[in-house]
């Protein structure tokens, strides 16, 4: 199958496996794992923060960040379809006791006016305070859309003025940085904490980082232990992360180029793709326009040997490009999907 379901499908390359095999390791819980320590230093610098902490998953990094920035009963402000709102099993409520004030975004984004509508003094009782703003870049549910720096800067500045702590779910932050031509630290330094995922476009088997100030990351160490996430010879995995930061960042542009080629190929063959939506490694198809339901479309594609996945939108399916797909796989998907879905080129 040409697996376009998600960029989490990547398997370690030979080079990454060699780095894993050669990894120097120690006891991570005692902060004695040299590979973990190196990865944390590199990630902190990359993300424009003082320190970083290694986690098994981006979900755990996000959840701990939210907890660090709040008290039970506080309010989390986030876009309605953000990963922390809809895909983390209510963790913000379960772990941090947060209530969620969801904002209807456009392509996962919103501005100071929308922030003000939910954080203006007087809209909450004194003890029920909006405490955390969480943004997502790229925004998964909108199809991998990026925040322009020119929108992030005023929004994060306004959030600070309103005394909110600010977290970035930057699971795919490096996709955003590469696509918008910005140094990752320019984005990362606007936030109090930043999550970066290693197991998506970066091609690691697992792992994520949370970056922030030295003081915040010290507190995160304790929370990580409390969550059962303190590990031992985790350098086996961290070495893959170090390798990925050295070898797999610039090449994200290849994934973006392939997504664009796939989108243009499908569009030319009559599939309903909105080309303007394609900014990074996601391509969304609205199969409703072909008179198909989502499950029917996915089943037909699977039958033809092309794996796509569902989205939050009832008629939209998505393809995600990644490290394990070459130009040949994209060419075959361009050929197979329109046939499977019965696309017709407009006369
Ligand atoms: C935007 C975003 N944040 C967080 C996560 C969670 O990542 P993990 O599977 O490592 O917990 C994902 C996973 O798809 C994601 O897309």
Image (cartoon, rainbow, N blue to C red):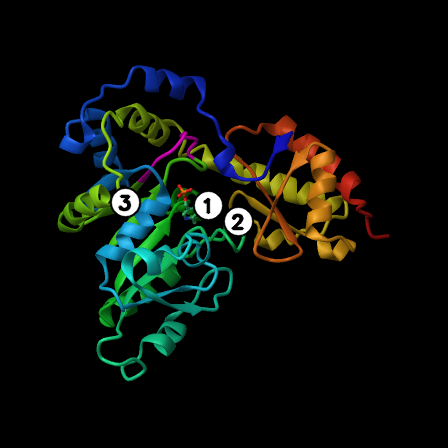
Task: State whether residue 191 appears in this view.
Answer: no
In this rendering, position of residue 342 left or right of residue 13: right
- Magenta region includes residue 347: no
Which quarter shows the N terminus? top right
Residue that numbered label 3 is attached to:
210
Kindly indicate whether the residue at mark 3 contacts the one at mark 1 (C-beta within 8 angstroms).
no
Expressed as whole percent of the image width and height from the top left, the position of residue 216 reads: 17, 51
Front residue (pair 346, 219): 219
For the residues labelled 2 and 1, the Cα–Cα distance comes to: 7 Å
The residue drawn where x is 32% and y is 45% is: 60
Task: State whether residue 132 appears in this view.
Answer: yes
Expressed as whole percent of the image width and height from the top left, the position of residue 184 reads: 33, 45
Residue 72 sits above or below residue 298 on the image: below
The residue drawn where x is 79% and y is 46% is: 343
Q: Is mark 2 within 8 Å of ligand 1?
A: no
The overriding secondary structure of the stretch rendered in magenta is loop
The residue drawn where x is 27% and y is 45% is: 210
In this rendering, position of residue 253 left or right of residue 91: right
Give, as a single range, the part of the protein colored magenta: 202-208
Q: Reading the chain from its start, which is encountered first: label 2 or label 1?
A: 1
In this rendering, position of residue 274 left or right of residue 171: right
Q: Reading the chain from its start, which is encountered first: label 3 or label 2?
A: 3
Please tell me whether mark 3 or mark 2 is closer to you in this view: 3
Q: Reading the chain from its start, which is encountered first: label 1 or label 3?
A: 1
- Magenta region includes residue 205: yes
Residue that numbered label 1 is attached to:
179
Kindly indicate whether the residue at mark 1 contacts the one at mark 2 (C-beta within 8 angstroms).
yes
Where residue 202 sits, quadrant-wise, is: top left
Name the mark on residue 6: none
For the residues labelled 1 and 3, the Cα–Cα distance comes to: 22 Å
Residue 23 sits above or below residue 115 on the image: above
């Amino acid at each position: 199958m040409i697996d376009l379901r998600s960029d989490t499908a990547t398997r370690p390359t030979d080079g990454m496996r060699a780095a894993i095999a050669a990894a120097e390791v120690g006891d991570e819980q005692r902060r004695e794992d040299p590979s973990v320590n190196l990865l944390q230093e590199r990630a902190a610098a990359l993300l424009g923060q003082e320190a970083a902490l290694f986690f098994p998953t981006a979900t755990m990094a996000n959840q701990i960040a939210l907890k660090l920035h709040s008290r039970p009963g506080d309010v989390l402000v986030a876009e309605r379809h953000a990963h922390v709102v809809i895909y983390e099993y209510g963790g913000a409520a379960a772990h941090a006791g947060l209530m969620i004030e969801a904002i209807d975004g456009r392509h996962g984004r919103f501005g100071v006016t929308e922030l003000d509508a939910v954080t203006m003094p007087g809209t909450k009782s004194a003890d029920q305070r909006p405490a955390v703003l969480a943004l997502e870049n790229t925004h998964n549910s909108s199809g991998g859309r990026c925040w322009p720096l020119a929108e992030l800067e005023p929004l994060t500045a306004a959030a600070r003025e309103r005394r909110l702590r600010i977290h970035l779910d930057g699971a795919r932050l490096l996709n955003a940085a590469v696509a918008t031509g910005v140094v990752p630290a320019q984005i990362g330094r606007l936030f109090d904490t930043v999550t970066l995922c290693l197991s998506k476009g970066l091609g690691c088997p697992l792992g994520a980082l949370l970056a922030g100030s030295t003081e915040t990351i010290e507190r995160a160490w304790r929370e990580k232990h409390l969550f059962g996430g303190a590990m031992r010879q985790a350098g086996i995995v961290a070495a893959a992360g170090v390798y990925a930061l050295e070898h797999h960042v610039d090449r994200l542009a290849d994934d973006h180029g392939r997504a664009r080629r796939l989108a243009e190929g499908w569009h030319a063959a009559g599939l309903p793709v909105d080309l303007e939506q394609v900014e990074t490694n996601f391509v969304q198809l609205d199969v409703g326009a072909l008179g198909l339901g989502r499950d029917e479309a996915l089943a037909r594609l699977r039958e033809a040997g092309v794996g796509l996945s569902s989205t939050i939108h009832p008629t939209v399916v998505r393809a995600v490009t990644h490290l394990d797909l070459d130009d040949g796989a994209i060419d075959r998907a361009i050929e197979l999907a329109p046939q499977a879905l019965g696309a017709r080129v407009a006369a």
